[in-house]
Amino acid sequence: MNTIMTTSCKRRRRARGFTMIELVVVLAVLGLLLSIAVPRYLDSLERGREQVLAHNLAQLREAIDRHYGDRGAYPDRLEDLVERRYLRALPVNPYTMAADWRTVAPPRGRKGQVYDVTAVGVAPPALPDALAPAADPASPADPAASAP
């Protein structure tokens, strides 16, 4: 009879829950797994945004080039590409979640206002000094200094 009581007491003690050591070990393992998984997940999100941005910029640039090829002039604004059916809709910038793009004017002597587009809200990658564009010797170094 005494062995039956001892066995039932042991079962009750085990049925109560986990020991503190077991909980600490489980939390340590979960923390280790999360410290590895979360940065990789965030990196994959960033790579995805970069790929979407590159694709959207390529679409816009291709539409600008087709517009120039068909009409002999660059569009006056990005919305012209949609109105003239070079694009179904303006692509969305994945960083700002809006169709906000910075436009670059064409070189002098070319018709139109939109020669190229860049992304708003994204820092451009740094270029090594050898690849950086050279300053135009005809233009002043500081445009604000030459203003009247």
Image (cartoon, grey):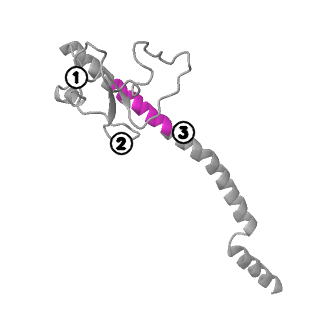
| Left/right of residue 6 with respect to residue 108 in the rendered view | right
Q: Is residue 6 magenta?
A: no
Instruction: Of the two numbered discs 2 and 1 on the same chain, state the one appearing first in sequence.
Output: 1
| Left/right of residue 44 with respect to residue 108 in the rendered view | right
Q: Which of the 4 image quarters holds residue 91?
A: top left
Instruction: Of the two numbered discs 3 and 1 on the same chain, state the one appearing first in sequence.
Output: 3
Tell me if mark 2 has few (under 14), some (14-19) or many (20+) residues whose alpha carbon lies within 10 angstroms of its own: few
Q: Which mark is residue 97?
A: 2
Q: Which of the 4 image quarters holds residue 130?
A: top right
Marks 3 and 1 sit apart, C-alpha to C-alpha, by 36 Å
Q: Return the x and y of residue 69 as percentages of the image width and height.
A: 23, 13
Q: Which residue is mark 3?
A: 43
Q: Return the x and y of residue 135 as percentages of the image width and height.
A: 46, 16
Q: Nearer the viewer, mark 3 or mark 2?
A: 2
Q: Nearer the viewer, mark 3 or mark 1?
A: 1
Amino acid beneath label 2: Met
Q: Which residues are the magenta region?
A: 46-59
